[in-house]
Amino acid sequence: MISLQMSRKTSQIQSRKQLWRLFSTISLPSSQQAEPPSFGIAFDIDGVVLRGSTPIGGATKALRRLYDDYGVLKIPFIFLTNGGGVRESKRAAELSEFLGVKISPLQVVQGHSPFKQMVNRFENELIVAVGKGEPATVMSEYGFKNVISIDEYALCFDNIDPLAPYKKWSTMEAAVSSTKKSIINSARVQAAFVVSDSVDWSRDVQVLCDILRTGGLPGSEEGPQPPLFFAHDDLKYQGAFSSERFGMGAFRIALESIFNSIHTKALTYASVGKPNPVAFKNAEVVLKQLASSLHHDLTTVDHANSRSHDFQKLYMIGDNPLVDIKGARQAGHPWFPILTRTGVFKGDPHSNHAEFPANLVVDTVEDAVNFILRNELIKS
Ligand SMILES: [Mg+2]
């Protein structure tokens, strides 16, 4: 009975959606036809909309205002986070559950999302993916065909981690095959990607130093350093604990410091997430695609049309001045940085960050969305 009622309700909503879409594209006079909005929003996640898996700052209510009465997205927005380690589709499903609104994978841009653009360079090369979650799965979904996680890679070299017998946790279900071992033992790693936060710093620093100082083959002579990429360089972030936790930037400092102590040439690396302008350029492209598809199924994005849409303003709502605000300021027009006080930044209500001031400082993400909708004269 309940399922019948639910399915009737769903079909009513579906038909109302269809009617609404029809109405918005056919029945309105041309001057009122739905145009893609001239603005978009990028939300940081940790310390802005979530702490761990708990919504904060009125996030659920604020996000609902960006959808119509039937749950159809009306304002283009994405999550622009440096976090990651899972596929965008999985993260979208988690966010939908935590925040109570329907999030499409297209709306999730993670620190490692720009790695997609490096597929041409490393498509068939042996690469190592580091970090929590499913770093190798993420990279193979992007199109890298010869990627191995550092967990599996370390298992291919006997005794590479002398502390392994003392570690009480297990990272792999099964040992690697002898065939795979012999392939990996004789191939050179062409690049290392730190996709998400390292779980086992001591092993990862050791194995990465082995790879990077030997030209990609642990145990061999010194050789030229293969390229090293980090998804981001956040020193700390606001998680579920009351004070900030060390992020990927802290791991980078540890790795770089040790590498430079044992090697004559300094470590070279690049990080692609916020505040790198590449992350904001990529976010703008995604928001354009989203704006163009607002009245279509989000799975069928009109890429050609997306290039012609220009935003007057893109709001970046973040809690970290050195990451979110610095990045939006560096990216310039049309970015408009808004700083919340629910995460890393804990200044007084009327203060701002001295080095990287935001255009606006608010208490919560809900205040930020209220400001934006008021500023854009949208009633909802
Ligand atoms: Mg944050």
Image: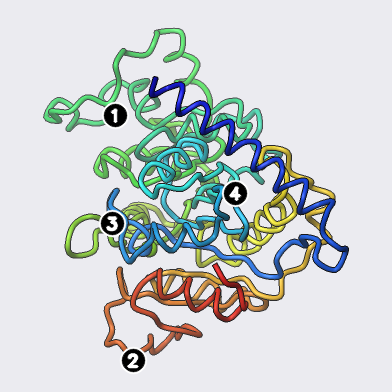
- 1 vs 4, front mark: 4
- 2 vs 4, front mark: 4
Q: Quadrant of the N terminus?
A: top left
From the Cβ of disc 1, is ligand 1 less than 8 Å away?
A: no
Q: Amino acid at mark 4?
A: Val
| Mark identifier at residue 55 | none
The residue under label 3 is 51
Ligand 1 found in image quarter: bottom left
Determine whether, in the image, residue 44 is placed left or right of residue 146: left
Question: Marks 3 and 2, how far apart in space?
Answer: 23 Å
Return the x and y of residue 25 as percentages of the image width and height: 81, 52
Name the one closer to the observer, 310 or 24.
24
The residue under label 2 is 350
Which element carries disc 1, helix, strand or loop? Answer: loop
From the Cβ of disc 3, is ligand 1 less than 8 Å away?
A: no
Which element carries disc 2, helix, strand or loop? Answer: loop
The residue under label 1 is 160
- Residue drawn at (50%, 55%) of the image: 79
From the Cβ of disc 4, is ligand 1 less than 8 Å away?
A: no
Question: Marks 2 and 4, how far apart in space?
Answer: 36 Å
Q: Amino acid at mark 1?
A: Ile
Q: Earlier in the sequence, mark 2 or mark 4?
A: 4
Q: Amino acid at mark 2?
A: His
The residue under label 4 is 72
Q: Earlier in the sequence, mark 2 or mark 1?
A: 1
Q: Earlier in the sequence, mark 3 or mark 2?
A: 3
